[in-house]
Amino acid sequence: MADESKTPGETPPVTSTQPGALPAGNQPVQIQIPIDVSKMSSVYCNFFRLSLSSSTEEVLMDIGMHTGIMPGPNAVEPIHLSHRIVLNPFVAKRLMESLRQIVARHEQAFGVLELDPQRRLRGRP
């Protein structure tokens, strides 16, 4: 396989069918796009906020972390947003579908993910 020659930390190339790239036989052309992960960093996120930009050509996703710590009575710790991801609606839809598939596989293997924290606590044995 092609993956056998890759170095540690290297992601194998993505094979993609490019729309509109049809040779004489009208068959889609397969191209391989290398992915460089050498400068990639990871960020933990347990909070996100989505919005359309003012131009409606981009979807903005702000991500960050909320510790859930209440510093005092009637006080709420702010959520610290650290990154903004800007997507066009087509990429946002592909992301949505990919996430839907990943969650469906997880739930099939491990059971339904309950989003309501109160129900999650009551559901534990």
Image (cartoon, helix red, strand yellow):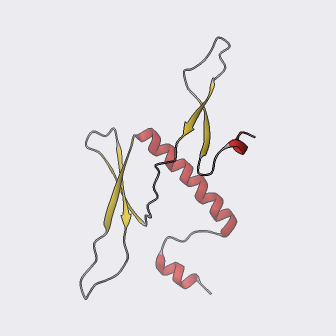
Q: How many marks?
A: 0
Relative image position of residue 50 (x, y in whole percent): 36, 54
The relative height of residue 50 versus residue 30 in the rendered view (above or below) is below
Location of the C terminus (image quadrant) = bottom right
Q: Quadrant of residue 43?
A: bottom left
Question: Residue 40 at x, y = what percent?
Answer: 47, 51
Residue shown at the point (54%, 84%) measured from the top left: 122
Give the position of the N terminus as an image quadrant.
top right
Q: Nearer the viewer, residue 81 or 43?
A: 43
Q: Is residue 120 above or below residue 38?
A: below
Q: Is residue 70 above or below residue 116?
A: below
x, y percent for residue 109: 69, 65
Query: Can you say whether 49 is above or below 80 in the image?
Result: above
Observer-nearest of 30 and 99: 30
Q: Position of residue 60 (x, y in %)?
A: 34, 49
Q: Is residue 18 left or right of residue 108?
A: left
Residue at left offset 48%, top offset 44%: 93
Residue occupying the point 54% across, 48% down = 97
Residue closest to the far top: 24
Q: Residue furthest right?
A: 1
**Residue, x 28% and y 84% (percent of image)?**
71
